Image (tube, rainbow, N blue to C red):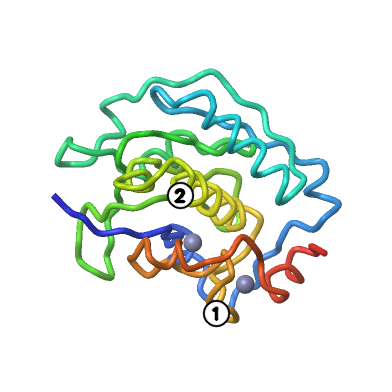
Amino acid sequence: MIFIFSSCKNELNNQINNTKKIIKTKQTSERKEMIIHILPLGNVNATILDFIKKSIYNFYQIECIIEPKQELTTDILAASKTRYEASLILKKYNSTKNTLLITEKDIAYNNIKRKVKEWGILGLGFRPGKTCVISTFRLKRKVSDAKFRERLQKVCIHEVGHNLGLPHCTYNSFCLMNDANGTIAQVDKEKMFFCDNCKKQIGMK
Ligand SMILES: [Zn+2]
Ligand SMILES: [Zn+2]
């Protein structure tokens, strides 16, 4: 059993896009026309879905639609069959519509850098792209509901940030676009904001 946290690894795209490639970010006008479809994978508490919808709107002014849940199927299980493989989830549900997948089950991915095949994560998102997946499993362990919601809000904003084209932030260690570097402590350290550099990249005021 791995008890390692990671807020996000958007390496699916980092592997393809090396740092020299210029990635187009979504600007304010494009965001205003965007709709994000929140897609529950398996049972997800309805108040949590509504909380995510409100959080995304408050931060980005992007409207979300909560879609009917999809069943968790065996084809997206990781090799150990004890958790789900985030990259398989993204491949399966990668859509032409902006989609935020959310599950209460544990998700992991093959962390090549750390040589861990099932590295437990909080979320994974394409950069830029239309699909991200978030798991509440590691966010809610041993914390109050208020703390859990704060973490969830941060991880959702972070993953949607990747979809909008934002890379990890190296300018301000409190900015929500920092790489969690394998610890949930980083998520807890971050404040509910984007630094000026990240804001500028997506034309946010
Ligand atoms: Zn990230
Ligand atoms: Zn930043």
* Relative horizontal placement of residue 113, taking residue 205 as reference (left or right): left
The span from disc 1 to disc 2 (Cα, nearest Å) is: 25 Å
The residue located at (27%, 55%) in the rendering is 110
Using a 10 Å C-alpha cutoff, classify the residue at mark 2 as few (fewer than 14 neighbours), some (14 to 19) or many (20 or more). Answer: some
Q: Quadrant of the C terminus?
A: bottom right
Within 8 Å: ligand 1 and the Cβ of disc 2?
Answer: no
Check disc 1 and report its element: helix, strand or loop: loop
Using a 10 Å C-alpha cutoff, classify the residue at mark 1 as few (fewer than 14 neighbours), some (14 to 19) or many (20 or more). Answer: some
The residue located at (25%, 59%) in the rendering is 4
Residue 179 point in image, percent of width and height: 46, 68
Mark 2 highlights which residue? 147
Mark 1 highlights which residue? 170
Check disc 2 and report its element: helix, strand or loop: helix
Residue 37 point in image, percent of width and height: 62, 32
Q: Amino acid at mark 1?
A: Thr
Judging depth in this view, the residue of 2 and 202 nearest the camera is 2
* Relative horizontal placement of residue 53, taking residue 77 as reference (left or right): right
The residue located at (24%, 69%) in the rendering is 114
Does 141 appear above or below 111?
above
Judging depth in this view, the residue of 56 and 94 nearest the camera is 56
Residue 104 point in image, percent of width and height: 37, 34
Q: Is residue 108 visible?
A: yes
* Relative horizontal placement of residue 61, taking residue 37 as reference (left or right): right
Quarter of the view holding residue 181: bottom left
Q: Earlier in the sequence, mark 1 or mark 2?
A: 2
